[in-house]
Image (cartoon, rainbow, N blue to C red):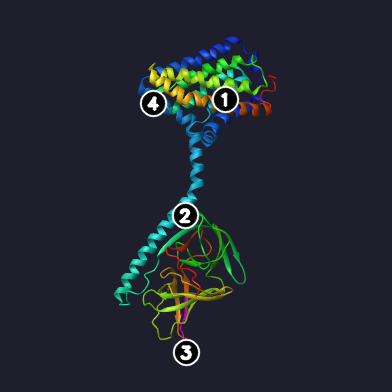
Amino acid sequence: MREFLRTTALWVAVAFIGDTAVGPAIAIRGVSPDFSMIALVLLALAAGPLPATLGGFVLGLVQDISNPGLLGLNALCKSSLGSGLGRLRGHLVYGLPVVDGLVVLLAVLLHDIVFLLFQSRLSDDAFLMPLVTQTLPVAVYSGIIGMIVIRLANMLGVFAREE
Amino acid sequence: MMSRPSQIPFSTENIALFVCLLLSVTLLALPEGARVLVADRLGMVLTAPYWNVRNFGEDVLHTRDENAWLRQRVAQLELMESSARRMQRDSDRMAGPALDPGYQGELVPCRVVMRQRGRFSTMIRIESLVPVDWKPWQPVISTGGYLGRLRLVIDRRTAWVELMASPDFAVGVEFERSGLLGVMRPRADRFVVEMVGRDEEVLVGDRLITSGIAEIRDEAGGRTETVTPRGFPVGTVREVSAPADAIFKSIVIDPAATFDYNETVFVVTPLASDWGSTP
């Protein structure tokens, strides 16, 4: 129970405080890390596919509320991604920051590709432009910050059981 | 709890994923109007409490500063209005155009952060919201009226103010109705106006304002001349008498400003740098 509370508190804090307070403060030319994705990776690696699927769904739904035109799309992407990332748990080389960073980077890329495919309705301009100008820098920045956050979480003992 | 995921059979994870996907697709498939409505209802449950708390916190943090700026604006407008009225009155009573109509400067809003009640002076420590080039002897007012003057500048944000309740304090005053001049001083537990001839007409209820007449002080660096601009409300006459053995009237006033509840005070800084000229 204690570990569950600790993990839940941590990923919720990373998602909400990160996106609302830290993100804008460390933004570089308008590019800030995707803390919701970092939180989802954290949850998936710490707790596995079921919590990550449900957590991803809730996280996506909260993000969808501010974009009612595509209500459900973030929830769809994040719950699928949570499930996939959760299944990676136990198959990764732990203790290597580069691996954590790469997982975050790929998760952001994959999420945004699916999201943009839906949003752009398969139009080239509406898909490629945001992918190159927004998704790529955000993915790289998120990977770097993700490495740090996951390292810190590791120090707090969130992955202790897994190791 | 953390060990639970590994105990849950694989199919449970799939069922959870299936339900989440189904819900997401259902939401996506809703008609536009219904989607907006559902998002609104979900927002009231999921995000509204967080935003309410956050907005409330921000409001609380900003209200005090906002109040200070609003009070400054109101005080400035009131001073400008009374200055215009004074000019009109001076003109009506043929006092001549040479008289200073009063307030011409800027008000710097400050917070009172400390009070010190000493035997020889009653001071407040103030903190400006913005850095300011203030100098000793500049007047300090509140929305009620004249409060005192800067005595000790610590840095561009902090200074000590000597209140007019300090035993050693004196300021030139003018009776607004008649233009009579006097000197206001604190005496024990009251404020009196001195140097007003016994035959002059002073009525209970007469309003007093700062006279704008220069004050000269002998200081370590030489003589300093400072001016408190004309027109800041100082008080109202409470008692008047003309003792048989005195050549001056005895006048007691009620101060316009209060000294106990001032949260925001304003330092009057000049537009032109005509302060503290040393001959």
Q: Hey, what amino acid is under mark 2?
A: Ala
Residue A54: x, y in percent? 54, 20
Pointer 2 and pointer 3: residues touching (CB < 8 Å)?
A: no
Q: CA distance from mark 4 to mark 3?
A: 86 Å
Chain of the residue under the numbered disc 2 shown in the image: B
Q: Residues within 10 Å of mark 3 (few under 14, many from 20)?
A: few
Q: Hey, what amino acid is under mark 4?
A: Val
Residue A143, labelled with which disc?
Answer: 1
Q: Hey, what amino acid is under mark 3?
A: Ala
- Do circles 1 and 4 both sit on a common chain? no
Q: Residues within 10 Å of mark 4 (few under 14, many from 20)?
A: some
Pointer 1 and pointer 4: residues touching (CB < 8 Å)?
A: no
Q: CA distance from mark 1 to mark 3?
A: 92 Å
Q: Quadrant of the C terminus of chain A?
A: top right
Residue A122: x, y in percent? 39, 16
- Do circles 1 and 2 both sit on a common chain? no
In this picture, which residue range is highlighted in magenta? B245-252
Pointer 4 and pointer 3: residues touching (CB < 8 Å)?
A: no
Q: CA distance from mark 2 to mark 3?
A: 49 Å
Residue B68, labelled with which disc?
Answer: 2
Residue at image mark 3:
B244
Q: Secondary structure at mark 1?
A: helix
Residue at image mark 4:
B36
Q: Quadrant of the N terminus of chain A?
A: top right
**Which label's residue is closer to the chain start, 4 or 3?**
4
Pointer 1 and pointer 3: residues touching (CB < 8 Å)?
A: no
Which of pointers 4 and 3 indicates the residue nearer the eye? 4
